[in-house]
Amino acid sequence: GPGDACANAQNITAAASRPGGTTLVGDTTGGVDNVLTPNACTGYAADGPDDVYAITVIVGDRVAITLTPTTAWDASLELVAACGEVACVAGQDEAFGGSPESLTHTFTSAGTFYIVADGYNPGIAGPYTLAVTITHP
């Protein structure tokens, strides 16, 4: 399953690179907030428990990510270069509880990046599906 920090993140590069990508099932309930992103990453705080997945990409790769809560909790989705406060690459938190959060990003640098399934506030957590597709140039 997913890790709860960058250091033990599950690498999903191979599965996400297949045609159609991959869909994972997870649950942030009972987790902790290990990935600290600034409010500017999504426009809101993302202080809830998080699950972390790793992807390794090359320049020009494009990732499409959709985080869908399977109950009515308010999810937040972040793509980060590291688990530090200044490492936000992209984020999405526009929907209310139970609604999916989606983002796409084309990479201008190669390396390992982290997808964070997060909660809007402390204690905001729950089960989800995470659909990830990496498209190569």
Image (tube, helix red, strand yellow):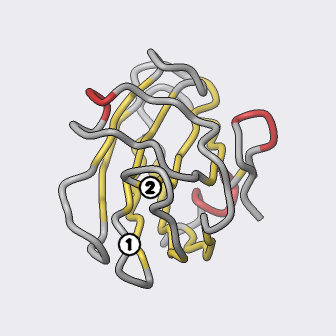
The quadrant where residue 44 appears? top left
Give me the residue at 45% from left, 62% from top: 124
Q: Amino acid at mark 2?
A: Gly
Q: Is residue 54 left or right of residue 109?
A: right
The kind of residue on which mark 1 rests is Trp
Residue at the image position 31 percent from the left and 31 percent from the top: 41
Pick whichever of labels 2 and 1 is earlier in the sequence.
Answer: 1
Residue 128, disc: none
For the residue labelled by badge 1, is the local secondary structure a helix, a strand or a loop? loop
Instruction: Spot the residue most to the top.
Output: 86
Residue drawn 31% across the image and 48% down it: 104
Q: Which residue is the site of mark 2? A: 119
Identify which residue, 42 or 9, lies in the foreground: 42
**In the displayed structure, would residue 32 be above or below residue 127?**
above
* Image position, residue 39 (x, y; %): 30, 30
16 to 4, vertically: above or below: below
In the picture, the quarter occupied by the C terminus is top left
| Disc 2 residue crowd, few under 14, some 14–19, many 20+, Cα 10 Å | many
Circle 1 residue? 73
Q: Separation of disc 2 and disc 1 at Cα?
A: 8 Å
User: Relative to 35, is 107 on the left or the right?
Assistant: left
Residue 115, x across and y down, in percent? 53, 46
**Residue 107 rendering spot, x and y as whole percentages:** 41, 29
